[in-house]
Image (spheres, rainbow, N blue to C red):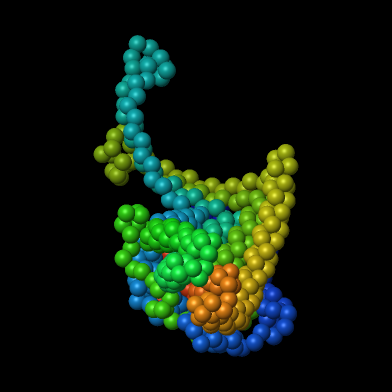
């Protein structure tokens, strides 16, 4: 058979094998959506309770409505928007996640090279002295130069799809890191907004405590005057002084929490504590979002970054099983080399240079590896089972988060309404007790109890107001944060709609 016929037959065989080849192992199919239509055992109310106070507006749950990409803008705070932007630009944890994403993407691209032929060039130049005796000429020797240049082509025929499954696994790893990056950004923005709301709550509690201190200071002066006039005992004066001291003692703890919250905000923005952010937050300057989107359960599994990351990990484990199975099958290789050899570099391209060529094919069939390949396949199967269980756990946790957030928002509204009534009742009781005490109608102990009740009710009211804001953030975070509605992803690339993952390449 001539060389041309041999090449033609070899090429035809290679094309035939490639067309007929199939990727062993299961093709990946994204898990089905959970068979549920809601987040709670009973239908949730569409509206929360309302209270005539700060942050007491009615909130409406809009089932099936989508979340805006910049959900923090719903609080209508320019200071909050600026701080979130600073954190997105400078937070080192987010930068690390973005770098890890770029690394994973470049690794996946590099891994794709195994599907293409490899071409390498080689050159060697040697100077040799050959004794005459070796050539049959005693007493003389030869010195010559030998230069060789060649191109070497090699191609692995991916008949059973092991290389394709390897590339598929690398691409799934890049998808995993992509959604990990989105999860990192969502956690960052939620932490920034939550810390800002904590600051606003603490400022409100400090302001309320300072007002109580002023009122109790004034009451102490009244008690002292009455003691001078003989209307009360020294014990009553000491009791009021003790109450005032206890209220003042609660102020440093609140101020400490405020300072630590400011440090946390500064850190989240990528700064050192001495470079404190300039933005400050007060509940009175924040707007409680009244229209709350609630994704359908079928959309939640496509929107939550941690669920998508778990799905990508499942995809990777599925592809790795295919690799382990393919490793038990034969491997086919085609290779070729062409070059020339001459007695010097200048002669390599001369017409009389010696031409060299090689055309070869090979097959390797694993026969005995001490059980390694079989146990690697079993390990890959166990890894797939583990990834599936972890995916299911992530989905369950996501549904719990949404259910918890919905319950919290409903309960928060009721709690705020009740706490407002308690605070107003305590304030009226305190005002009446002060009047009665001044008239000598009640004992000082009764007044003291009224003061303590009001102090506790006032602080709890501020906390209840802040809880509605904080748990609103919790709902946005639980639903995925709206990353799919942004024009740019956390990793810097264009955002993609949360569509169903495409199954890995397999043979057809």
Residue located at (42% from left, 42% from top)? 356
Q: Closer to the camera, 26 or 363? A: 26
What is the residue that sits farthest to the top in this orientation? Answer: 139
Q: Where is residue 19 in the image (x, y as percent from the top left)?
A: 60, 65
**Relative to residue 301, is residue 5 depicted above or below?**
above
Q: Which of 374 and 436 is in front in this view?
A: 436
The image shows residue 369, relative to residue 74, as above or below, that is above
- Number of numbered markers: 0
Image quadrant for the C terminus? Answer: bottom right
- Image x and y of residue 98, in percent: 43, 60
260 on left or right of 330: left
Q: Which residue is drawn at 31% across and 29% down?
A: 145
- Estimate the x, y position of residue 361 in percent, counting from the top left: 56, 49
Residue 416: tell me if it is visible: no
Query: Is 38 left or right of 274, judged from the image as shown?
Result: right
Residue lying at 63% horizontally and 62% vertically, measured from the top left: 314
Is 451 placed left or right of 103 in the picture? right
Say above or below: 277 vs 399: above
* Whole-percent x, y for residue 466 in the image: 50, 74
- Examine the image and state in which quarter residue 453 appears: bottom right
- Residue closest to the eye, 28 or 139: 28
Residue at (54% x, 77% y) in the render: 440
The residue nearer to you, when weighing 439 against 98, is 439
Q: Residue furthest front?
A: 230
Which residue in the rendered view is the most extreme toward the left? Answer: 346
User: Could one spot residue 313 in this view of the protein?
Assistant: yes
């Amino acid at each position: 058979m001539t060389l041309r016929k041999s090449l033609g037959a070899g090429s035809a065989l290679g094309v035939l094998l490639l067309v007929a080849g199939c990727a062993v192992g299961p093709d990946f199919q994204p898990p089905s959506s959970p068979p549920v239509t809601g987040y709670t055992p009973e239908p949730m109310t569409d509206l929360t309770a309302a209270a005539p106070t700060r942050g007491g507006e009615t909130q409406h749950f809009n089932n099936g409505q989508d979340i805006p990409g910049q959900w923090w803008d719903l609080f209508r705070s320019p200071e909050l928007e600026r701080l979130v932007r600073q954190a997105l630009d400078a937070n080192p944890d987010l930068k690390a996640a973005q770098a890890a994403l770029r690394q994973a993407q470049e690794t996946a691209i590099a891994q794709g090279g195994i599907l293409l032929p490899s071409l390498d060039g080689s050159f060697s130049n040697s100077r040799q002295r050959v004794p005459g005796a070796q050539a049959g000429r005693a007493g003389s020797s030869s010195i010559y130069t030998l230069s060789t240049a060649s191109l070497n082509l090699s191609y692995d025929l991916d008949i059973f799809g092991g290389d394709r499954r390897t590339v598929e696994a690398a691409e799934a790893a890049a998808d995993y890191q992509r959604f990990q990056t989105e999860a990192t950004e969502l956690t960052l923005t939620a932490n920034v907004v939550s810390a800002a709301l904590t600051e606003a709550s603490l400022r409100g509690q400090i302001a309320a405590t300072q007002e109580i201190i002023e009122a109790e200071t004034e009451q102490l002066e009244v008690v002292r005057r009455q003691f001078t006039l003989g209307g009360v005992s020294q014990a009553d004066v000491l009791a009021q002084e003790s109450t005032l001291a206890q209220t003042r003692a609660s102020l440093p703890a609140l101020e400490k929490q405020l300072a630590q919250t400011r440090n946390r905000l500064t850190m989240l923005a990528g700064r050192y504590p001495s470079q404190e952010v300039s933005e400050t937050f007060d509940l009175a300057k924040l707007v409680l979002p009244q229209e709350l989107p609630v994704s359908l359960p079928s959309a939640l599994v496509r929107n939550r970054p941690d669920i998508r990351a778990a799905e990508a990990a499942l995809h990777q484990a599925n592809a790795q099983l295919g690799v382990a199975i393919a490793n038990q099958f034969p491997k086919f290789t085609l290779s070729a080399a062409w070059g020339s050899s001459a007695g010097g570099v200048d002669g390599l391209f001369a017409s009389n240079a010696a031409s060299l060529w090689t055309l070869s094919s090979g097959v390797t069939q694993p026969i005995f590896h001490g059980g390694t390949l079989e146990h690697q396949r079993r390990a890959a199967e166990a890894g797939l089972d583990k990834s599936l269980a972890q995916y299911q756990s992530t989905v369950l946790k996501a549904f719990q988060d949404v259910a918890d957030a919905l319950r919290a928002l409903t309960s928060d509204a009721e709690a705020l309404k009740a706490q407002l009534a308690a605070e107003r009742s305590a304030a009226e009781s305190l005002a009446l007790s002060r009047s009665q005490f001044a008239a000598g109608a009640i004992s000082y102990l009764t007044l003291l109890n009224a003061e303590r009740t009001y102090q506790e009710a006032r602080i709890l009211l501020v906390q209840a107001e802040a809880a509605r804001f904080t748990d609103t953030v919790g709902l946005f975070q639980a639903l995925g944060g709206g990353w799919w509605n942004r024009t740019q992803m956390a990793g810097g690339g264009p955002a993609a709609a949360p569509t169903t993952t495409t199954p890995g390449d397999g043979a057809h």
